Every structure is written in C-alpha cells, then in structure tokens.
Image: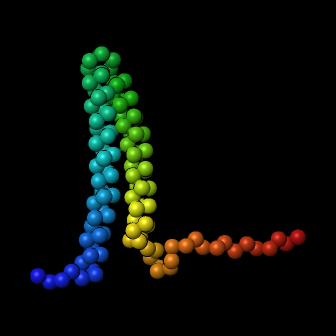
Amino acid sequence: MKPETQSDRSAREQRSILLHYGGLGMELAGGILGFVAVGWWVDWKFKIGPVGVIVGSVIGCVGGLYHVVRRAIQMQKELQESGRSRPSDGSPDEPTQQHQRPDAD
C-alpha cells in the first residue's frame, strides 16, 4: 500500500467539504417537501383547498433557507478554524487596511 501524499489528503478534504455543502441542498429540499406534505394532509383532512400546500411550501422555504444559511455559516467557521480555508492568492487571512484619502479642505 502506498503512503498517503499531501495531494491525496487535499483531494479527500475537498470531497468531504463538497459533500457537506451538497448535503445542505438535500436538507433544504427535504424541509420543503416535508412541509408541503403536511400542508397537503391539512388540505385533505379539513377540505380547505390549496391553502395548506401554499402555507406549507412557504414555511418550508423560509425555514429551510434559514437552516441552510445557519449551517453554511457554521461550516465556514469550522473550516477557518481548522485552517483548511485559504485565500486563493496565498495571502494571510487578515483584513486589508483601507487607505483613506485626506480631505481636500
């Protein structure tokens, strides 16, 4: 068996990151479909037309997007803490200083 090289580890980490972000999309779709199903059941049970499906889809979209954004922020913080997220230009992860022009007055 060959020893694992740096490029092998890097490729494996990239796949792991992509799978985590891809899973977020599945969670969003699952939340929307779950609430639409509940809305469909409410429509069927109380015979109120498409109101349940519409309300369920809106709740699913809003709740799902909230969850996705929250998880994406959390995942990004974890990546930055572990040191796996680096800028593409190779510069350190420090804020750049803004140069201000002196006032003309």
View extreme (front): residue: 81
Q: Report the side of 59 relative to 9 (left or right).
A: right
The quadrant the C terminus occupies is bottom right
Which quarter of the figure has residue 3?
bottom left
Count of marks overlaid on the render: 0
Q: Tell me if residue 39 comes above or below residue 83 in the rendering.
A: above
Q: Is 69 located above or below residue 89 in the figure?
A: above
User: In the rendered image, which quarter is residue 48 located in?
Assistant: top left
Which quadrant would the N terminus be assigned to in this image? bottom left
Q: Where residue 38 sits: x, y (%)?
A: 29, 29
Scheme of image coloration: rainbow
Reply above or below: 36 against 4.
Answer: above
User: Residue, x 80% and y 73% (percent of image)?
Assistant: 102
Q: Quadrant of residue 82?
A: bottom left
Front one among 14 and 32: 14
Residue 42 locus on image (x, y percent):
30, 22
Q: Residue at x 32, y 51 (%)?
A: 25
Q: Residue at x 26, y 76 (%)?
A: 9
Give the x, y percent position of residue 45. 26, 18
| Residue that lies at the very extreme toward the right in this rendered image | 105
Q: Residue at x 37, y 43 (%)?
A: 64
Q: Residue furthest top?
A: 46
Q: Position of residue 87 (x, y in %)?
A: 46, 74
